[in-house]
Image (cartoon, helix red, strand yellow):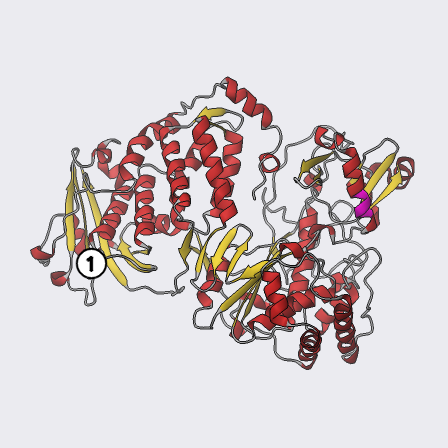
Amino acid sequence: MADDGEPDSDFDEDGVWKPPFGSGNMGYGRQLAIKVQGREKPFEDGAGLCSPGRWPPERRGFEESGFTWEVRAELMKVLAGAIEIKRVLFGLACGHYKSSPFPEEVVRQGRLRWLHVLEEYGSELACLEPPARQPLLLQAIEEHLRLAGDPDHRVFHSSSVSFSKGVTIGIKGRMPRVPAVFERRTRWRRYEAQEEAPHDKENYSSARCQTAQIEAQFREEAELGAMREVEEVAARAEYGEDLLVAAIGAIDKGDTTFRVIHDGTHDVVVNPRIRARDQHRYPGAGELRRVNQLSAGHGVAFGLVGDVSRAHRLPRVMRKEWGLQACQLRPGKLWLNEVGTFGVGSAGYHWAREAAGLSRAVWSVMFREWLFQLLYSDDYAWIACGDAAHENILLAVFFLVVMGVPFAWKKFRGGLTLDWIGYWSDLNLRLVGISAPRAAWLIRWADRILTEGAVHMGDFASVLGRWGFALNAVDLLKPFLGPLYAWASAVPRHAVLPLPAMVRLIVLFLKRMLKEGYRSLPCGNGADWTRESFRADAKAEGEDVCIGGWELGPDSDPAKARWFSETLTRFNAPWVFESGEPFRVIAALELLATLCCLVAFPPEGEEGMVGSLTISGTTDNLGNKSVVARLLTTKFPLVAVLMELAAQLMHRGQVLELNWAPRLQNLEADALSNSDFRGFNAARRVRVNVGSHPWIVLPDMLASGRALYEKIREGKVERSLSDLGRTAAKKAKVPFKDREPWS
């Protein structure tokens, strides 16, 4: 859905001017960037556009002002005077704590000293106690952010629509627009139209069977200030048409408790009416990789990960919208959610905004210390280097506790390696990959569908999303998803289909790579420039098909270079001619020339690769530059060549950066593709027999891919359901993410 074009006011709901993007103490010079599918994107730390964490430590904007310096000094005095910093930090990293490692008196002292500094610098609103039924010291947090120059401090308390007084879920009030923190949102999820007016919906069977247990959990939520039980008659009198009782479902968590899902979409039609105007970006594998690159030369790196407890349940919702978040367990009684609710679309946004402010408060006392703080939803990761690494990480955690953030202490882990949001990182070997539990889940899924020989396409599409997320960390395996995406898009989601040969081969290969330990890759040094290693080209004119390439070497002299030139025929490369005229597959031929450069010109004088080597090649096919950068295409036979290229790179421990040059700047490679060897030394020629070379996956992918892509092109995909299919289709009525949680 496109942008609705609604104008945004320069003032908030109270007529206060909104600081624009660029406000606040951020950083100077160029901010950090990452590469995602070949494109450069801004580095995100989860704390919004105005976060100093988006810059390298030495270029962050916070100066050591008197206020922030005193806050840091006072908090460190409390920490150093009451606990052994390294012992507590290492205990958290080893998962030894089931409750807070900071005694209540230590937290109280931290709060008293923090509030004392706020008062010294003119604050009159700071309060030692949180608002009723809330854990966060919202007034004090706002004052801290105000004194630190943060552009979004008012939302914590003083605004008429605030975390202290209540925020809108987006029905009785308009969702906010905060240009200093978030970019403007331009696309929204598309919901199926509902002909009937919004109305109540009965609970799902999973909840009806667990009423007593869910009720006990609701009473615990009520004690925390998140819910309240009311008489249905009184609620209908107060809210009228704005009382909508949603269906709830219950997912067994395996520990005698249930994950309660509030369906804010069907029948009550709450989510389809919410229009968020801000787009929040989260960090991921790219940011984790960039932090690892930046840590080089700064000493031993140490990391810690932690989980905020009930994060989406922390932002308070304004009372007039509680009726829109109602549910029922017993006749005559209703439960109203007073806070953000799982299943209501705006809950994630409000927590993201609140968490971003909390994270920026931490940044204000870190100055230019070598620390990175990444926040994905409610999952924190802290990575630090240098002599003060341990103090900085524990100070960040302690300050969040002082502000009132509730952590799930049993989930803290860390050390020299990290497991965070499904990614794994060795901070000192600088490796990033898939976590062991996520890899094990993907292997089990692969085993299951390979054994059954068939898959429900709705489930298949869901798992493809998980593969895509996981392989952001191991991007050399991403080309193998191309045919899977192509197949999934060509068949109905409700069908259960046998696995085509190519799909089976790809699933087998991915499973084998994960089982053999290929679930991480070196991060490299993040250099913006790599010396050009080779140039390649291809020609396809009628039956005359030839590929060629040469190694530039230190002085780029063709007379001293290794080179190759090979003619492709119907005998050694029949796939080139299967589409009719070979020029139709010129992109695949150009990429094949690049692949042959990779296998023909290994580093001289080295028996094998150690670590990671980044090489750079040049082609005059601009499209292939994008394909290699993204490591993804759904086109055949190009995808088969790309898969082989990726497999070779992973096997050799290499990374390829493919550049583009106009044909007039690629004359030598062009000559080789035309069998013109003048200027090249015949003794330096390398032969690459395309038909018999020991490729890793290319022959199998070409052979099996023909049948799959023929079916996709012609739309002749089997649509009938077997008996097994009917059973799986029936199960698929429960969302896959709930039936198959990702460990």
Q: Which residues are magenta?
A: 218-222
What secondary structure do most residues of the magenta stretch adopt? Answer: helix
Magenta stretch contains residue 701: no
Residue at point 66%, 40% (across, down): 253
Q: Where does residue 40 sit, x and y in percent of width and height? A: 45, 58
Compared to residue 225, the image places residue 119 above or below, namely below
Residue 305 at x, y = what percent? 59, 59
Residue matched to label 1 = 551
Q: Position of residue 680 (x, y in %)?
A: 10, 57
Q: Residue at x 78, y 33 (%)?
A: 211
Taking the image as shown, residue 440 lies to the left or right of residue 476, namely right
Query: Is residue 148 visible in this depiction of the protein?
Result: yes
Amino acid beneath label 1? Glu
Q: Nearer the viewer, residue 14 or 589?
A: 589
Q: Nearer the viewer, residue 426 or 181?
A: 426
- Give left or right: position of 524 versus 122: left
